[in-house]
Amino acid sequence: MRDIFTMALIYATLRSATPLIITAIGGLISERSGIINIALEGKMLIGAFTAVVVSYYTGNPWFGVLGAIVAGGLMALIHGIVSIKYKANQVVSGTAINILAGGLTVFLLQIIFGVAGTSPQVAKLPSWGRFHPLVYFAILLVFLTHYVIYYTPWGLRLRAVGEHPSAADTVGINVIRMRYIAVVISGMLAGLAGAALSIGGLNVFVKGMTTGRGFIALAAMIFGKWTPIGALGASLLFGFADALQMRLQGIGIPS
Amino acid sequence: MQPILSMEGITKRFPGVIANDGVNFDLRAGEIHALVGENGAGKSTLMNILFGLYQPDEGRIVYKGEELTIDEPNQAIKLGIGMVHQHFKLVPPLTVTENIVLGSEPKSGLKFDRKKALKDVEALSEKYGLLVDPNAKIENISVGMQQRVEILKTLYRGADIIILDEPTAVLTPQEVKELFDILKGLTKQGKSIIFITHKLGEVMEITNRATVMRRGKTIGTVETSETSPTHLAEMMVGRQVLLRVEKEEAKPGKPVLRVDGLSANDDRGLLSVNHVSFEIREGEILGIAGVEGNGQSELLEVLTGLRKPVSGEVYLNEKKITGLTAKEIKNHQVGYVPEDRHKRGLVLDFSVSENTILGIHSRKPFAKGVNLDYKAINNHADHLIEKFDVRTPNNQVHVRNLSGGNQQKIIIARELDTDPVLFIASQPTRGVDIGAIEFIHRQIVDARDNGKAVLLVSAELQEVMSLSDRIAVIYEGEIVDILEAKDATEDKLGLLMAGIKK
Amino acid sequence: MRKEDIQDNIRELLIPIGAIILGLLVGAVIMLAIGANPIEAYKALFIGAFGDMNKFANTLARSTPLIFTGLAVAFAFRCGLFNIGVEGQLYVGALAAAFVGGNLTGLPKIIHLPLTILAGMAAGGLWAAIPGFLKAKRGVHEVINTIMMNFIAYALIGYLVADVLKAPGQTPRTVPILPSATLIRLGELVNWSNSRLSIGFLIGLIACAIIYFVLWKTTIGYEVRSVGLSPLAAEYGGINSNRKIILAMVISGALGGLAGAERVLGFDRALILGFSPGFGFEGIAVALLGRNHPVGVLLGALLFGALSNGGAWMNFTTSVPVDLIVVLQAVIIFFVAADQIIRVIFPKKRKDWGAV
């Protein structure tokens, strides 16, 4: 057993947890504004794909990261327009985003690379010490979000908008705008998490590579009681399970 | 005196109705001005226009000598117009201070300056004599306290005009008195107050002038010192009001409902019905008077099986029905008109027909086994529509599209048609037009005359006094006294409702 | 039917039809962007779906599971529940049907087939009962619950079919369904077709009729719809909301299980891992498109079946990849869900009773 629980396992936990943490924080910001975001999965997938495409064409993974953020934000903007402006059911439009992401990535994989399942290899993010940069960013993000939500006027307004939108409205807070901003930020973060997956941990895009991590992140956020620190804890727990599973498979114990 | 605000010829149309039709209203600096009228008279529309929530189709607004348009609440707030809504706009998990400064928070750099916010709120609270605990969370303070927070919110934003929408509906008499003192204090500091209400007693007590609205029009503005409640009431309804309902002396028979030491908790788990005992005989109406929120809702929910009691017993014709389900109690021939017809009494997106069988839908002839017999259901609906004069194009219309009075008639028709031995009616005429009120009152008295035991709960003291044969007064979950209706005066009941027992 | 009813129904139809038209337009724009000819592509799509009797039969075969999953989503929705766990319920239904249908030997068809179908329905129903129970008794949101139940179902089936129940051979699949438990296919009845369209399609039509009858002609449906539209009014009317929530989830799950059973007993004749391209999720779209009405669900299922099968033909004969169809389906969902977009693009008069 001593072989299993090593520092390597802790590092693996952090790596597995990184996309979950970033996505969970995104989901949290969206939910705090009153928008249920079950589309995190799709936005993550789009982010992972875009990161690879941009990295492929520019040869620079940082542009890939940027592309992933923009793509996730754009998907979120669609989600926002449909569910905020046109008042569609948030769960339905979220489901549509997830379906769209699944179809669009495979469609474009064929159009752009002419392949069905896996993209060509692209430049991946460098390692800073033991981890790729987004691992550090994830941890930083948690504490930054904590500060913003509990110690800034914007955070106070965000909480008010989610808890009691008409109260926020009567004191002149633009509820619609707050929700757009929150949803777009959550999409940008989910897109970034996708980049962490495709060009952080790996250097390719694989069809459906998020394999439900967007939903796991959603669960982590709920498990963490809609607080950044709680979401971090839950994400680490799920990341640990993931890392442990890989380790057990590695030494031949069926998980 | 030059008015601080005048609204002239305001017209606002919605599809199918004219909510405001050439309305004139003006407000003097430092006065308390009542805006009175029945539900649907157009008071809220007018105030929403002033607050920038609606744009008028015609008319002009002159404020502090300047003609302007108010496009959104933000602008109204900046102009110094504040509004305290009937349903408070407070965020429950945030603190008093956070709620007051929300939207105009003091900052130091990017950070929310909590210390300055606290200091500002304390200063404001002291200046206007509105005592609050700035660090308490909204969800933990009383309704009266929450109202003060709402007033402080408007003052924090520099309001010169404060609009209060039905501010006393949720308050105890003691809290009302405190509110009135606060309002008088505010006018001394130069604030002007618009006081929306339909309680004429309050108009007489606190206001300088009153503007009466009816059916979207202003009927007139009067100096309070030169008018009387009767005169105001006439202006409101346009004819002599039937304050007393024509009815014979009650001929009560044997007891039907007996409540013995009943206690129950509210949704938060706090004791809200405290050891209540009373009985109702056949052929009599027992009215329950009390300020809303003193356990009336919970009491009725226990009696009708929607809430489990903590202790005590309920007997119907000497059969114990304590803790039975809503369905079982209904099957014991209990008719119930719930206080909130939109949430409880009707499925708004069901047709009139489908609503006429809610609760009796598995009985014959509507159901045969699990199959519904729509022919029987539609016939039943047509019968009720005719008998109770429900104004609807046909029985297939969704009840959402009907007026409040017609919706209420459907519920009353459904509940009375089952020939109950006990008929419970809660707020039976709330939000209902005057014609329907008379009809509904008639139905309640007829039910009594047909030998049913009737339990009436209403926030309208007048309604309780004019319909009931006996009146029980509830205060903080306890029945403080039960009087014969002929011995009950408004003063006596008022004291009891405030928990003062001689 | 009265005139107003007919007008209402036409209005109800306008939104899905508008959404489909807009969806196809978006698809055409994408095709133009990748240098393909949309007219050619849509022609191929149509021929692929309806070009001959055999293709039409295959389209019906592709639609069959969607009828069940669409009904499953719609029924839950009528009770105010969002069952996005139909995919998982379909999986466990398929598993139960594959197990009972493939391993219980010596039974006559008249017993074995109904038993197998019932096993599939029961498994799906039980799987859905768990989130139903959690929602009713603990107030846990069913969207989150059913998502998590999907994960468990995937993992469970993945493990069982790749390991414990795996038939010999390369592909992860269970043993073939015994002849006594199969649903007969069209290709086995006539010689002009080799279609795997099974009698399950007829079961789908019957299911539509039954669900319609249950929802609008029985006290159960009345109670379910009351809970869906107004839980408090339902409670006041003596209806036990919690029991109805669990019941609606069980019925919904049973329909999802039936979808899985049909696929296993009729189309695939075994449980093959990865047999569902997301029938459960497509069911959400189908239910939406069909306005949660059984007739609408049937039409929606046919459309989605046609898009999928026609899309494959389009992929085969033109340069447009089949995955564009998935994009198109998502776009249609957007437009149906945000029906106000349709109302803006295709304005219509609304009647008003003049009530306030």
Image (spheres, rainbow, N blue to C red):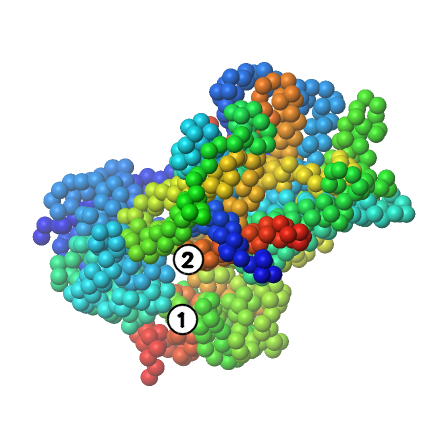
The amino acid on which the numbered mark 1 sits, given as a three-letter code, is Asn
The amino acid on which the numbered mark 2 sits, given as a three-letter code, is Ile
Cα separation, mark 1 vs mark 2, equals 41 Å
Q: Are marks 1 and 2 in contact (CB under 8 Å)?
A: no
Question: In the displayed structure, does residue A108 sit left or right of residue C182?
Answer: left
Splitting the image into 4 quarters, where does residue B145 fall?
bottom left
Which residue, given by chain and number where applicable, does mark 1 sit on? Answer: B294
- The front one of B461 and B440 is B461
Say which chain tag 2 marks: A
Q: Are marks 1 and 2 on the same chain?
A: no
Category of crowding for the residue at label 1, using alpha-carbon neighbours closer than 10 angstroms: few (below 14), some (14–19), many (at least 20)? many
Question: In the displayed structure, does residue C195 sit left or right of residue A60?
Answer: right
- How many discs appear? 2
Say which chain tag 1 marks: B
- Position of residue C217 measured from the top left corner of the image (x, y, whole percent): 67, 46
User: Residue at left 33%, top 65%?
Assistant: B137
Q: Which mark is residue A229?
A: 2
Category of crowding for the residue at label 2, using alpha-carbon neighbours closer than 10 angstroms: few (below 14), some (14–19), many (at least 20)? some
User: What secondary structure is marked by label 1?
Assistant: loop
**Quadrant of the snapshot with the C terminus of chain C:** top left
Q: Which mark is residue B177?
A: none
- Position of residue B500 measured from the top left corner of the image (x, y, whole percent): 33, 79
User: Residue at left 62%, top 21%?
Assistant: C314
Residue farthest bottom in this picture: B502
Residue B489 visible: no
Question: In the displayed structure, does residue A39 sit left or right of residue C303?
Answer: left
- The front one of B2 and A73 is A73
**Quadrant of the snapshot with the N terminus of chain C:** top right
Question: In the displayed structure, does residue B228 sit left or right of residue A149?
Answer: left
User: Residue at left 38%, top 50%?
Assistant: A141
Splitting the image into 4 quarters, where does residue B10 fall?
top left
